[in-house]
Amino acid sequence: MPYEPVTFSEIQGVRYLHLGTPWVQGAMRIKKPYSIELEYAQQMMAWLLFLEASNTKALQLGLGTGALTQFTNRLNDTIQTIGVELNPGIIIAAQTMFFLDVKSPRMKIIQDNALNYVQNTNNHHQFDSIQVDIFNGEASGPALSSLDFYQGCFNALKEVGVMTVNLFSRHPSFNTNINHICDVFDNRVLLFNEVHDCNVVVIAFKGPHLEISWDDLEHRARYLRKESGLPSKKWVKNLKKCNVQPEKFLSI
């Protein structure tokens, strides 16, 4: 099958990934190759507010530059990461142009269609976290947005798990994606505000009802900031502002 061409650009010390169009598919600050450059991609790590990273298994659907897979893999020495990407050119680019270290024994990169992967029963109940960032070259909307796809993601999570998804707020599929995620995850869904050019990150929860005070969540965010360097402190304010929640606690 034909794959979209993988192209690159560099501006002011940042290298960008493209798929034959000007639309950005990922980025890396060359002097900080192991950091996450784009704000929406940083928000994709917000599952760390709710799950401990130790001894967890994380799935990335849509590899991009490999920034999320690599960052997750480097959180500690016990986490396992799997990246699933259909386009072999992206897999090569992540390694050669964006320094993805696939030699880690705790990392596996698989060339496969993400829908096929999550529907495979061998992959059900395997992951603590799933990060979904799958776009075509035009980056106009998610390449996968069906109810079956999100049901597969739900099934791939363990009994307690968190999924983050990058959506495009101005694409006609935005409401469809939100509705499908809400249907599958029983409305246990939070949204960040829009960043960049229309990126909206969604967090969906599987497992027992979660109730945590905003103060405790802010304490967790400060810890994450210290341990990982992620801008997690503003995530809590963002989630509180953008979602209908009680004043004193998050209930989801």
Image: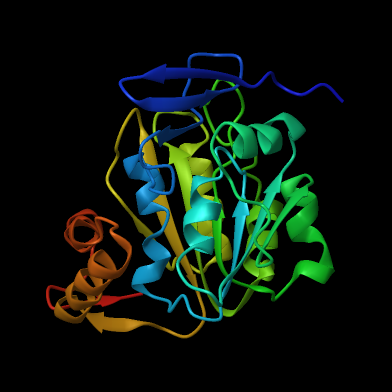
Query: In the rendered view, would you say 112 is above or below 249?
Result: above
Residue placed most toward the observer, 247 or 195: 195
Looking at the image, which is closer to me, 188 or 71? 71
| Displayed quadrant of residue 106 | bottom right
Would you say residue 143 is visible in this rendering?
no
* Residue at (76, 24) in percent of width and height: 3
Q: Of residues 71 and 189, which is closer to you in this image?
A: 71
Residue 97 appears in the figure: yes
Residue at 59% from the left image edge and 40% from the top image edge = 134
Is residue 34 left or right of 129 when viewed as pictured?
Answer: left
Spot the residue most to the right.
Answer: 1
Whether residue 102 is situated above or below residue 183 in the rendered picture:
above
Relative to 21, say whether 100 is above or below: below
Residue 215 is situated, as x and y percent measured from the top left of the image, at 14, 78
Q: How is the image coloured?
A: rainbow
* Quarter of the figure with residue 119: bottom right
Left or right, 61 with reference to 212: right
Q: Could you tell me which quadrant the C terminus lies in? A: bottom left
Q: How many marks?
A: 0
Q: Is residue 125 left or right of residue 19?
A: right
Residue 69 at x, y percent in the picture = 55, 54
Screen quadrant of the N terminus: top right
Residue 49: where, in percent of width, then height?
34, 71
Left or right for 152, reference 59: right
The residue shown at (48%, 72%) is 76
For image coordinates 57% across by 38% down, the residue present is 64
